[in-house]
Amino acid sequence: MKQFLSVHDVADIDALIAQALDYKADPLKDQNLGKNKRIALIFLNPSLRTRLSTQIAARQLGMEVMVFNIDKEGWALEFEEGAIMSGHTSEHIKDAAPILGKYFDILCIRTFPTLVNKEEDYSELYIQQFVKYAGVPVVSLESATLHPLQSLTDLMTIHEFWPNSKARPKVVLTWAPHVKPLPQCVANSFAQWMNAWGKADFVITHPEDYELDESFTHGAYITHDQNEALRDADFVYVKNWSTYRDYGKIYSNDPEWMLTEDKLSLTRNARVMHCLPVRRNVELSDEILDGPHSIVTAQAANRVWAAQAVLANILHNLV
Ligand code: CP
């Protein structure tokens, strides 16, 4: 693997899930693979799970890890080609990224979308500029439109909690209310990975006007009827996203879309997933999060092994 920006960088999803499960069973089996290699985790936005799980994963492969909150501790970066830098930005990515590429063997980057400029966000300007100028492999810790480490974790978790390998689980991605306009990254990415994986009956449900980019959802059954979607589901992935077409807006905050035990009774005793952080009693009720159906903690714990599998693949390609 030369980089990890989306599912398109993965040759075999099942093999990568199997590798992640192998690391879960034996975390230190490749503890010298990353010896004398340095990795940077560069954040332009906050993180709890991604920041910590990726550090643990890299250390378990023997790597030296540095975390750089570039938005707070670095110079304000300019990403536009040919920019006249007379405003608030102090350093061009053209100058910063090659230096980071000399200091580190792998660069992991978290960016976020503006949720204002759809064209810029969906061009993945920020992470693509790191790829263009760093000269070393780049791993997405979440970009403007995708969150591939989360999605690999999600598929690994579904695989783990679905022991019946002969039957296809029904997996539902359901929109949930939120008080802030959130990125479409997790939903886009989950849809992209689920469709590429093809091992489940995949349904997306959301209110009208919350359609996602079809390039990610193509292949899924999409309905505005949440109850119809939930019927006989084996996994329910709960996530808010803001509008895609009229970009970055909140059209509906209908609390009726929050998953409850009543709604869950429509499912086949479904496991409930969420990438976290979650707004309790807005996106998901206490009764679900604290109840027996929730697998959100196990899901988040799996972030370590997914990251470890990805970093190991990139390290194998370096040596
Ligand atoms: N799910 C996720 O990426 O969590 P963090 O934003 O805390 O890293």
Image: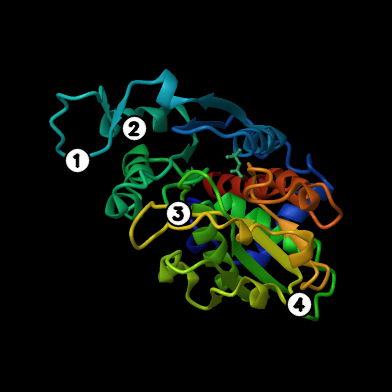
Q: Name the front one of labels 1 and 3.
A: 3
Q: Quick one: SS at disc 2?
A: helix
Which residue carries the number 4 mark? 232
Residue type at mark 3: give it.
Ser
- Circle number at residue 98: 2
Q: Earlier in the sequence, mark 2 or mark 4?
A: 2
Q: Quick one: SS at disc 3?
A: loop
Instruction: Give the quarter of the figure containing the C terminus.
Output: top right
The quarter of the displayed image where residue 87 is located: top left
Q: Is residue 17 above or below residue 303?
A: below
Residue type at mark 2: give it.
Pro
Crowdedness near tag 3: few (<14), some (14–19) or many (≥20) residues, C-alpha within 10 Å: many
Residue at left offset 60%, top offset 45%: 311
Q: Is residue 182 above or below residue 109?
A: below
Where residue 281 appears, as percent x and y from the top left, is: 68, 46
Q: Is mark 2 within 8 Å of ligand 1?
A: no
Q: Earlier in the sequence, mark 4 or mark 1?
A: 1
Q: Quick one: SS at disc 4?
A: loop
Where residue 110 appears, as percent x and y from the top left, is: 48, 39
Farthest residue toward the top?
73
The quarter of the displayed image where residue 242 is located: bottom left
Does the residue at mark 3 contact the one at mark 4 (Cβ under 8 Å)?
no
Crowdedness near tag 4: few (<14), some (14–19) or many (≥20) residues, C-alpha within 10 Å: some
Q: Is residue 179 visible?
A: yes
